[in-house]
């Protein structure tokens, strides 16, 4: 094959901070780029990240080097496949959730499992950072709320406050402002333990359950995760429940001033001065009015919260299938006097234990589980190899997914889409009220790629539901359409800024990929064609001035840019199109000196004004390589160097390992380490590179 770069390839001799205009642009596509400050890159010395051995140069075309690497990765992934065909890898967050689990058992007054507490304590001690506290991501700065919870849990378990690690934690917490600096959710926990007064917590009366849908604050106007967390929490806050705390553990040593001086938190950086002042005034009014509300109305509101929770308890998978909502549901039942052996309460409590990961000598609690996401992405990586055994494993995984499609439960999304039939997949084993648009697109793409005839009904229903979930601006949120009431992030309760689920580029680009691929087999209906065009315009419109795209659910601009370039390629944009060239140029510009790519949580800062490089990771290097290939840059030197980095960093077990967090729960608040990302994304990138090189083509034929 001819290895010479085509005329559309970028000039590898430059590291551009701006990109050339397209030489041609299909007339059907218009581009407009929103104003952004993100126009510069932060240079830094990469020498400390260079591998111990020189990164190997690539052969002129894929050889047994690739076959061996891909074969070992496939074998490892197939070994990790469960007997019933699915994959599920660990999903790790920060210290908050294992600490909360310990504190929940003492809140309920349960007889603690001492062995489990000891293993969680071992995990918390190991993840304590050099600065003395606990970060939100591996190697990150101290987060005061996570640190307070971890310290509290260790003290509850029995660690002496005078031990060196406890002294270091205490000093770090006090230097960060102590308990008064904690976020709203931590303050609620501290109020339940009588450490803080309830006046330090924003008022959220349970009567919210009775508000009409047109009211400016209604639970249908917030995201699914906020809705499921808040509903049982409304009961807990209204009743002002207190933890049993049989060991009587307190945290007085973490105050920097008298607890009586601790009031509401000041305005968060993301909050508008005007809106925050208005809602703080509303909070003051509610404090005065709430005690006077009729008792009958309160009982009716509590009944509504309980009914909402019971309807969505979701069996052994729990309310919303996420830890905070599940824990709040158990505490709500306890506060209302529901006995521990009540079937609903007992199952809700058991669901929490299913999130525990036990290793040799330590344990932690996952925020949720990711079997649908993991299985679909593993299937894509294996299909890319083209190997019969890998394809068979992918088929078993996709067959496992078929009965998990939600076809008969009309979820909360129907409030804004009452005429749409269900047809999505959840992220977890089961979460029928809250299917995930992103998962649905990725599953449908894999099914369509493997065998459209075999999976035709599932793919058609998925496509129908995804089109129905499209928002008016052409994009998609993860779980809700039109979830854009941005003023709600200004209420005092929303110091985290994560109340909403607005459309995002990464989800929208995958939906665009899906619609282009699955409807490419037959003429599109007018509705399908219109949805695709609106999605295309949304992705083009959201490109940043520097050529990148924002990534909501993965770190960050590397993830978003891979997603967008894949969608634009699926939509038929040529590599010469300005959006494709600018996206590829950005990826080339931010490549690390060692050939990989890395980006951390600093890219989510409110004052972000340009790319900040981080040590290379396997998952982000794979995303960048896949993005460059999607943009037609298969033969660019940056792509070759990324592939060489992946080959060089493959481990003896055939996989790649990374401790870095590259997944996003809520920007600036909660991040995730998907243990599967370093396993299947590098395989996917290597297999795609090998496949296209051997075919002698420069265009990806699939949606992602």
Image (spheres, rainbow, N blue to C red):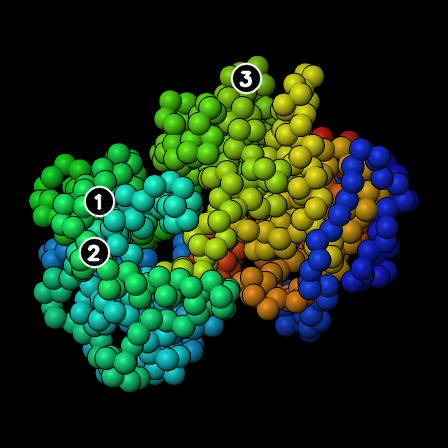
- Residue at 22 percent across and 44 percent down: it is 301
Quarter of the image where one finds residue 448: top right
Which residue is labeled 3 in the image?
A: 456
Labels 1, 3: front one: 1
Q: Secondary structure at mark 1?
A: helix
Which of 504/13 is in front? 504
* Rendering coords of residue 347 (x, y %): 20, 39
Q: Is residue 216 left or right of residue 612?
A: left
* Rendering coords of residue 422 (x, y %): 44, 25
Quarter of the image where one finds residue 411: top left
In space, the residues marked 1 and 3 are separated at their CA atoms by 44 Å
Q: Secondary structure at mark 3?
A: helix
Residue 253 visible? The answer is yes
In space, the residues marked 3 and 2 are separated at their CA atoms by 49 Å
Dot 2: few (<14), some (14–19), or many (≥20) neighbours within 10 Å? some
Q: Is residue 262 left or right of residue 293?
A: right
Dot 1: few (<14), some (14–19), or many (≥20) neighbours within 10 Å? many
Image quadrant holding the C terminus, namely top right
Which of 599/33 is in front? 33
Earlier-in-chain disc, 3 versus 2: 2
* Rendering coords of residue 423 (x, y %): 46, 25
* Rendering coords of residue 460 (x, y %): 54, 20
Which of 568/37 is in front? 37
Which residue is labeled 1 in the image?
A: 301
Which residue is labeled 2 in the image?
A: 238
Tell me whether circle 1 and circle 3 mark residues in contact (CB < 8 Å): no
């Amino acid at each position: 094959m001819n290895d010479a770069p085509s005329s559309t390839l970028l000039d590898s001799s430059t590291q551009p901070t701006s990109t050339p205009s397209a030489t041609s642009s299909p007339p059907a596509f218009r581009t407009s780029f929103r104003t952004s400050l993100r126009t510069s890159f932060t240079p830094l010395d990469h020498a400390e990240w260079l591998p111990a051995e020189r990164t190997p140069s690539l052969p002129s075309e894929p050889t047994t080097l690739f076959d061996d690497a891909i074969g070992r990765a496939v074998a490892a992934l197939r070994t990790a496949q469960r007997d019933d065909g699915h994959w599920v890898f660990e999903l790790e967050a920060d210290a908050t959730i294992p600490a909360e689990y310990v504190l929940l058992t003492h809140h309920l007054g349960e007889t603690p499992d001492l062995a489990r507490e000891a293993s969680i304590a071992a995990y918390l001690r190991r993840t304590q950072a050099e600065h003395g506290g606990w970060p939100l991501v591996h190697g990150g700065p101290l987060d005061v709320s996570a640190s307070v919870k971890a310290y509290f849990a260790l003290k509850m378990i029995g660690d002496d406050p005078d031990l060196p690690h406890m002294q270091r934690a205490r000093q770090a917490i006090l230097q960060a402002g102590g308990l008064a600096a904690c976020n709203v959710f931590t303050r609620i926990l501290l109020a339940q333990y009588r450490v803080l007064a309830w006046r330090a917590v924003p008022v959220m009366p349970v009567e919210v359950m009775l508000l009409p849908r047109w009211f400016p604050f209604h639970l249908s106007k917030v995201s699914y995760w906020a809705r499921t967390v808040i509903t049982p929490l409304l009961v807990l806050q209204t009743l002002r429940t207190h933890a049993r705390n049989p060991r009587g553990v307190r945290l007085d040593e973490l105050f920097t001033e008298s607890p009586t001086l601790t009031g509401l938190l000041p305005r968060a950086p993301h909050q508008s001065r005007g809106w925050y002042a208005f809602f703080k005034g509303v909070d003051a009014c509610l404090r005065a009015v709430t005690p006077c509300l009729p008792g009958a109305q309160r009982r009716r509101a509590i009944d509504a919260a309980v009914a909402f929770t019971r309807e969505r308890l979701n069996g052994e998978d729990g309310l919303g299938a996420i830890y905070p909502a599940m824990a709040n549901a158990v505490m709500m039942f306890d506060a209302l006097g529901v006995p521990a052996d009540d079937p609903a309460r007992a199952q809700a409590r058991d669901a929490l234990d299913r999130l525990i990961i036990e290793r040799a000598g330590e344990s932690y609690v996952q925020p949720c589980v990711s079997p649908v996401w993991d299985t679909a992405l593993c299937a894509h990586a294996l299909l890319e190899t083209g190997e019969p055994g890998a394809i068979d494993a992918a088929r078993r995984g996709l067959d496992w997914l078929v009965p998990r499609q939600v076809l008969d439960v009309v979820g909360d999304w129907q409030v804004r889409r009452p005429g749409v039939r269900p047809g999505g997949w959840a992220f977890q084993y089961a979460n029928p009220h809250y299917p995930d648009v992103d998962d649905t697109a990725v599953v449908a793409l894999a099914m369509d790629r493997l065998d459209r005839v075999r999976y035709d009904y599932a793919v058609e229903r998925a496509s129908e539901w995804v089109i129905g979930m499209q928002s008016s601006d052409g994009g998609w949120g993860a779980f809700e359409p039109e979830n854009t009431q941005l003023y709600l992030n200004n209420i005092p309760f929303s110091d985290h800024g994560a109340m909403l689920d607005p459309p995002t580029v990464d989800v929208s680009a995958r939906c665009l990929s899906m619609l282009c691929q699955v409807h490419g087999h037959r003429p599109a209906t007018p509705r399908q064609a219109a949805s695709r065009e609106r999605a295309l315009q949304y992705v083009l419109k959201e490109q940043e001035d520097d050529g990148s795209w924002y990534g909501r659910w993965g770190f960050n601009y590397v993830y978003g840019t891979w997603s967008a370039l894949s969608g634009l390629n699926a939509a038929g944009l040529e590599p010469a199109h300005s959006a494709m060239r600018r996206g590829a140029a950005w990826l080339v510009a931010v490549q690390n000196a060692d050939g990989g790519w890395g980006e951390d949580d600093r890219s989510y800062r409110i004052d972000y004004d340009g790319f900040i490089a981080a040590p290379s990771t396997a998952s982000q290097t794979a995303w960048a390589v896949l993005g460059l290939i999607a943009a037609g840059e298969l033969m660019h030197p940056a792509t070759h160097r990324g592939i060489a980095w992946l080959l060089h960093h493959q481990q003896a077990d055939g996989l790649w390992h990374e401790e870095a967090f590259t997944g996003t729960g809520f920007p600036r608040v909660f991040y995730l380490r998907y243990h599967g990302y370093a396993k299947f994304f590098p395989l996917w990138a290597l297999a795609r590179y090998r496949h296209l090189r051997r075919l002698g083509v420069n265009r990806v034929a699939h949606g992602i």
